[in-house]
Amino acid sequence: MTVDAAGTWIEGPLGQPLRKALGTRTANALAKLGLETVGDLVDHVPRRYDEPGRLTDLRSLQVGEHVTVLARVRSASMTRMRSRAGAMLHAVVTDGAGELDLTFFAKGQGGLRHHEHQLAAGRTGLFTGTVSVYRGRRQLTHPQYQVFGLDTGVDEAEAALEDASRPIPIYPAGASVPSWQIHKAVQTVLGPLREDDVPDPLPLALRERRHLSTRLEALRDVHLPAADEDWRRGRRRLRFEEAFVLQTALAQRRAAVAREPATARPLRATGTPSLLADFDAALPFELTDGQRAVGEQLARDLAADRPMQRLLQGEVGSGKTVVALRAMLQVVDAGGQAALLAPTEVLAAQHARSLRTLLGPLAEGGLLGGAEHGTQVALLTGSLGAAARKQALLDAASGAAGIVVGTHALLGEHVQFADLGLVVVDEQHRFGVEQRDALRAKGDRQAHVLVMTATPIPRTVAMTVFGDLETSTLTEVPAGRSGVVTHAVPASNPKWVARTWQRVREEVDAGHRAYVVAPRIHPDDATPGGRADQAAALAETDDVLEFLAEPDDGGERAPLRAVLEVVDELRATPALVGVPVGMLHGQLPPADKERAMADFASGRTPVLVSTTVVEVGVDVAEATVMVVLDADRFGISQLHQLRGRVGRGSAPGLCLLVSDAEPGTPARERLDALASTPDGFELARRDLELRREGDVLGAAQSGRASSLRLLRVLTDAELIADARTEATAVVEQDPDLLTYPALAAAIAERLDPEREEFLERA
Ligand code: ADP
Ligand code: MG
């Protein structure tokens, strides 16, 4: 076996073109599935397995049963059908004791010639199908069958019998090649392979310790199982391998960054004036235990001279921002700068505003009346006016601004920092490895990086999607919150809908605020506005990331509610007479967006009709009601985020999910799940369960990126965690995998730039 510069196997049986191994015709058909080499073909593993038909004698056949029978053809005859156009082949088979009919239909007799030829009287064969009854006689319609030649020996018949009792592999197939043909092809190429021909990415010691079979054994198990336990064992071993290869790549990334030097930003000694100490003293609440513990972890990370690479994930409203802020202040205290990246302008502006408020005079460093050890907060977004932008850029470059808040515009190359020490990425579902790298590389030396997810994600998803980071988790929300009660409201019930607006009125009268979220902006928008609006919101951040995976249940339905239309409706709703209604969506000019948020926060417009731009992070303590129209159009984590916008103060929150989704539909299941639990981690788990396998890593998983398709982050959670432990150990001992050529080659081959896309998209 040989490896070329790109790490691909260029010799050996696995690299052999299928044309050579199977002939041009079969190879051409398989090429349509993207299978070019023997290696491709053996990696094309069955999607599932059908049970073999139970071998039965003809007298005891039960109607409805899926059976395989061994029998001899007594007669076969072709007839033209009288009742409808077409032809029929009728055969009778017998096992000496009983009889059974076989019937085949076709448009014309030509379509039946093949069967007629195969089912010559006197021939013996195996027939598989489901038993039905026609005119009192039991029959199989279009059975699968395999007949033996007239000269078939006893051995061959017995082998066929044994074959018939095996699980039947069902392959991902196409119109050009049916599953059984793939199976035959795999059998042909797998037969002659020896252990040496199939490099195994799993180190020998690990395989022995975990009692795992070799790669070749695993391939035989999944392609040619004699029993169910075989393919289960083989599949498990291949999944472990897949997780292990991925985790090794991620461990290498972690190790590579950890080798880079970073500037240590230790805490100031107690007693010395510091922004952090002042900030803590001014904080109007106690930190939760979780916030304290994670805070200590971050403080340690930042004090080290290697770059922090950490993911902070947590429940919506668990107070991640404060934790991040404290880390930023530690860095500023140590003489460095911190950058805070938000996914939208609305959020960036809010962060800058609340930072300045929280820091008070501390945020007026260098200004008259500002604290001496204070600093400045600069806001840098794509839509700033030229002068403001120039000033912000200047403050970042001179170091006058210790904290720079922005959207992804901050990633722009022209943005310079005097001494960037920490980058915090807030509220991102998806923030690729590449972007993390770009950020880290902003300074002369590597900056510390903290990534915060918007919603809770299951542990093994974090390990996979954010596998290059270490993880900290906040599970509790601060005490004293009354929480959010969630109800599904049927849109077709006018009484309930009227009651919804009545509730909004009551909250407004009590001095609270209400969000009303709709999926579209314009009523005549062809595209569902949620996504378009997200795109608009993100376009302004210079970097459109695929942010949302909106579920689409398809089918005909009433037009989606639109912000512009709902605003008018609410203004005319009797229950809301005299209540000012504001409006917010991604297509508004930035100044209007700011004003809409400010007016809502201040209570000038206590009702805000909006698209999902309020989805993440928006923090208005007085907001108590969240009404989501066409709620079934949103995903679970999105809805969980949305309801996280209310019940943030001491008054209890109410979330009303208005939808016409029928009970029992998947859409309705999502809403019911939300109503049933406030626990974001539990919801994230259910969300994954409700989705199709593979969606976890993005829809772009093509059929051929076979390795990730198998990996099921929930059911294989333990396996992924084990693989991560093993991979970390291997990389610690041999970072460049010099003693593991097969593993290095598997990483290069399976995670080449194209396939590594999932990391970038993550
Ligand atoms: P998220 O984790 O969703 O980003 P935030 O950081 O936005 O949560 O915090 C939500 C709200 O809770 C904010 O208004 C914040 O000031 C407040 N908060 C944070 N920590 C605490 C705490 N320990 N006690 C009380 N309120 C807190
Ligand atoms: Mg937040």
Image (cartoon, rainbow, N blue to C red):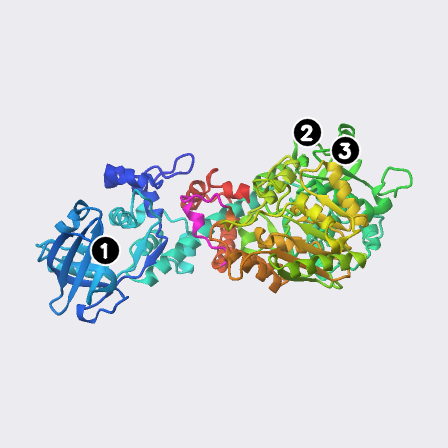
Q: Which residues are magenta?
A: 699-714
Q: Secondary structure at mark 2?
A: loop
Q: Position of residue 381 (x, y in %)?
A: 71, 36
Q: Residue at 64% across / 42% down in the picture?
A: 521
Viewer-side residue, 511 vs 683: 511
Foreground label between 3 and 1? 1
Q: For the residues marked 1 and 2, what is the alpha-carbon distance in whole angstroms?
A: 69 Å
- Most extreme residue toward the right is 369
The kind of residue tagged 2 is: His
Q: For the residues marked 3 and 1, what is the alpha-carbon distance in whole angstroms?
A: 75 Å
Q: Which residue is mark 1?
A: 142
Residue 280 on the magenta span: no
The kind of residue tagged 1 is: His
Q: Check the picture and name the quadrant holding the N terminus.
A: top left
Q: Residue at 8% across / 54% down in the picture?
A: 150
Foreground label between 1 and 2? 1
User: Which mark, by number, is residue 392?
Assistant: 3
How many residues crowd around disc 1 within 10 Å: few (fewer than 14), some, or many (20 or more)? Answer: some
Which SS does the magenta portion mostly show? Answer: loop
Tell me if residue 165 comes above or below residue 279 in the rendering: below
| Horizontal side, residue 717 vs residue 447: left or right | left
The kind of residue tagged 3 is: Ala
Viewer-side residue, 141 vs 34: 141
Residue 703 on the magenta span: yes
- Most extreme residue toward the bottom is 60
Q: Position of residue 513 (x, y in %)?
A: 76, 54
User: Which mark, by number, is residue 414?
Assistant: 2
Tell me if residue 34 comes above or below residue 132 in the rendering: above
Which of pointers 3 and 1 lies earlier in the amino acid sequence? 1
How many residues crowd around disc 2 within 10 Å: few (fewer than 14), some, or many (20 or more)? Answer: few
Q: Check the picture and name the quadrant holding the C terminus.
A: top right
